[in-house]
Amino acid sequence: MTYWPGAVRKLDVFRALSQPWIKNQLLTDKLRGIASEVDRLNRERNRYVHGVFGHEAGKPKELKLFNIKKTKHKILPIAEHKSADDIKQVAEDIAVLQTDLESIVALLRRSSQKPTN
C-alpha cells in the first residue's frame, strides 16, 4: 500500500476485505455494496473530471459535458446534457458513500476490540 493510496487502491482494499473469510455477513454485504458504489461513482467522477463542460450560444444554463471517445482513426467528442442538479447529485452520492465508509470503519473498530475466547 502506498502512503496516500488513490481511490482505486482503496477500493481494492474494500474488495479484499469483503472476501469470504469475514464471518459477519452483514459486514461482508455492506463492503461489497460499497465497493460497487465506489466503482460507479469513480466512473462518473472520471467523466466529469476528464470531460469538458460547455453550452450552446445563448443557453448558458444548459450545460453539456463533452467526453472524448476514440474510434479507429478519429477522436470524436460526445456531448451529454448536464445540469447543476446532476452534478450536485453526484456530490450527494459521494457524501452518502463517505457516511457508509465511516460506519464500516466504526464497525471494524468495534469488532477488533471484542475479546476473543
Image (cartoon, helix red, strand yellow):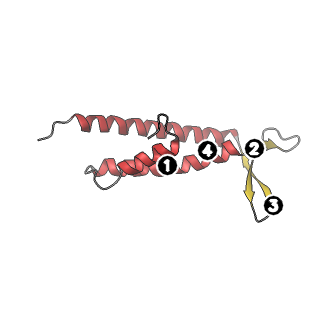
Q: Quadrant of residue 85?
A: top right
Q: CA distance from mark 4 to mark 1?
A: 12 Å
Crowding at mark 3 (Cα within 10 Å: few <14, some 14-19, many 20+): few
Q: CA distance from mark 3 to mark 1?
A: 32 Å
Crowding at mark 1 (Cα within 10 Å: few <14, some 14-19, many 20+): some
Question: On the image, numbered disc 3 is attached to which residue?
Answer: 74
Q: Disc 4 or disc 3, which is closer to the eye?
A: 3
Q: Nearest the camera: 6 or 117?
A: 6
Mark 2 and mark 3 residues within 8 Å of each other at the beta carbon: no
Question: On the image, numbered disc 1 is attached to which residue?
Answer: 37
Mark 4 and mark 3 residues within 8 Å of each other at the beta carbon: no
* Element under disc 1: helix
Q: CA distance from mark 4 to mark 2?
A: 13 Å
Name the disc covering residue 52, or none: 2
Q: Amino acid at mark 1?
A: Glu
Does label 2 or label 3 sit earlier along the sequence?
A: 2
Q: In this image, 63 relative to 103: left or right?
A: right
Does label 4 or label 2 sit earlier along the sequence?
A: 4
Q: Please provide percent x and percent y for residue 76.
A: 79, 57
Quadrant for the C terminus, please.
Answer: top left
Mark 3 and mark 1 residues within 8 Å of each other at the beta carbon: no
